[in-house]
Every structure is written in structure tokens, then in C-alpha cells.
Amino acid sequence: MKNALVWLRDAFTNTFPIEAKCLFLDLLWPAAAGNVAWAVAQVAIDYDSGQSSASRLAVLILLAIYLIIDWSRSKSLPEKSRRYWKGDAIHLISIVAFAVAVAGNKSTISEWSLAVVFLVGVVGHSAGVWEVNESPNGWRRFSLAFCGGLGIVTLIVGHVRFQPPLFGTMFVAFVIVFAAWIGTRMVIVATKQANGNVENNHSSVK
């Protein structure tokens, strides 16, 4: 039975050679971006002068910018492991759920779904899911996980102080995480470059 299942799997993959990289970068990421774009359009069309609409629109636009930056980064990276794509799948599902909730003006669901987006980032980075060509046991994964932790703490503080939840709090949480994530990524790249220059200098001395 096991051999038959293996043969069936191999036959299917040989007949339909679907690569995870192409599936995510050319289909699922654009689909998620389209979902966020639809959410932005819906909030903009139904826009009113209240603070809720402004905060909802702002957080969705910021989410769209994040997707553009992260998609570009993912596309430029070398080959990635299967768990990289599994982490991305869960991440995209949580992002789409959040965008739909914001578009529907569901503040409580939006708050919880954004917490899930941050939690996925915390767990994924802590486990080294998105590490490429390097050991996941360094300081990098914990510093990136810390970014999502900042967002969760901000949401908890906002939840305790404001009821029902405010989209403004969600926007602030997203700004904090986004800024921390970009800053941490820049520090990681700068550190790699500095280490590379040191190694090259040592090689020249030798």
C-alpha cells in the first residue's frame, strides 16, 4: 500500500511539476495582495468622516506596502526550504483573514486576527522558518520574533484600555512592528556585510 501511494505521488508530481516557489511568488502572494487591494477599495468607497474609516484605510495601505516589500525580498532570495513556504502559507492566510475583517469593519475580529498575524511571525522566526542558508540558532531569529512581540503587547495594552477595540490601536501596533521589522532586517544585512569585510581583510592578511 505504501509503495502504491509513493508511486501515485511520484506520478502526480512528474505529470504536474508544481514548484512551491512559483506557486507562492506567482500565484498566492499576488492573490493575497489582490485581496488587500480589494479591501482598500471597499473601505475607500464606503469611506465616511469617522476616525474608524481613516484608521482602517491607513492600516490596509500599510499592509499592502508590507506585502510589496516582503514579496520583493522573497523573490530575490535564493532557494528556500519547504518549511519556508509552509510558514509563508500560514502567514498569508492570517493576513488575508485580517484584511477581510478590516474591510468588513469587524473591530473585534480584526484585533484577534492581527494578533494571529503577529503570533505567526513570532513563532515562525523563533523556529527559524524563514532563515535562508544559515543556522536558525543565532540572534537573528529572536530579534525578528521580538518585532512581532511588540505588536502583540501593543494590542494587549489597547485591548485593556479601549472597548470595543479601536482600529487606531491596530494601526499603531502595525506601524511599530513594521518599523521594527525593517530596522532589524537592515541591521542583519549590515552585520553580514561587516562580517564579510572582516573575513576578506583576514584573508588578505594571510
Image: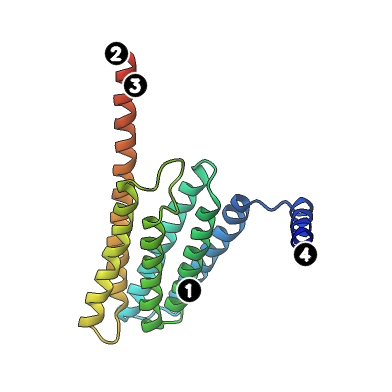
Using the image as rendered, state which of residue 104 and residue 75 is in the foreground: 75
Q: Earlier in the sequence, mark 2 or mark 4?
A: 4
Q: Of helix, strand and loop, which one carries label 3?
A: helix
> Label for residue 205?
2
Cα separation between marks 1 and 3:
46 Å
Write the residue at 32% across / 13% down. Answer: 206
Q: Can you tell which of label 1 and label 3 is closer to the viewer?
A: 3
In the shown orientation, is residue 99 left or right of residue 2?
left
Identify the amino acid type marked 3: Asn
Identify the amino acid type marked 1: Ala
Q: Can you tell which of label 2 and label 4 is closer to the viewer?
A: 4
Write the residue at 26% across / 76% down. Answer: 156
Q: Earlier in the sequence, mark 4 or mark 1?
A: 4
Q: According to the image, label 3 marks what residue?
A: 200
Using the image as rendered, state which of residue 125 and residue 53 is in the foreground: 125
Write the residue at 51% across / 68% down. Answer: 93
Q: According to the image, label 1 marks what residue?
A: 97
The reply to whether dot 2 and dot 1 touch (C-beta < 8 Å) is no
Q: According to the image, label 4 marks what residue?
A: 1
Identify the amino acid type marked 4: Met
Q: Earlier in the sequence, mark 2 or mark 3?
A: 3
Cα separation between marks 2 and 1:
55 Å
Residue 52 drawn at (x, y percent): 33, 79
Using the image as rendered, state which of residue 97 and residue 130 is in the foreground: 130
Q: How many C-alpha atoms fall within 10 Å of the one at disc 4: few (<14), some, or many (≥20)?
A: few
Q: Of helix, strand and loop, which one carries label 4?
A: loop
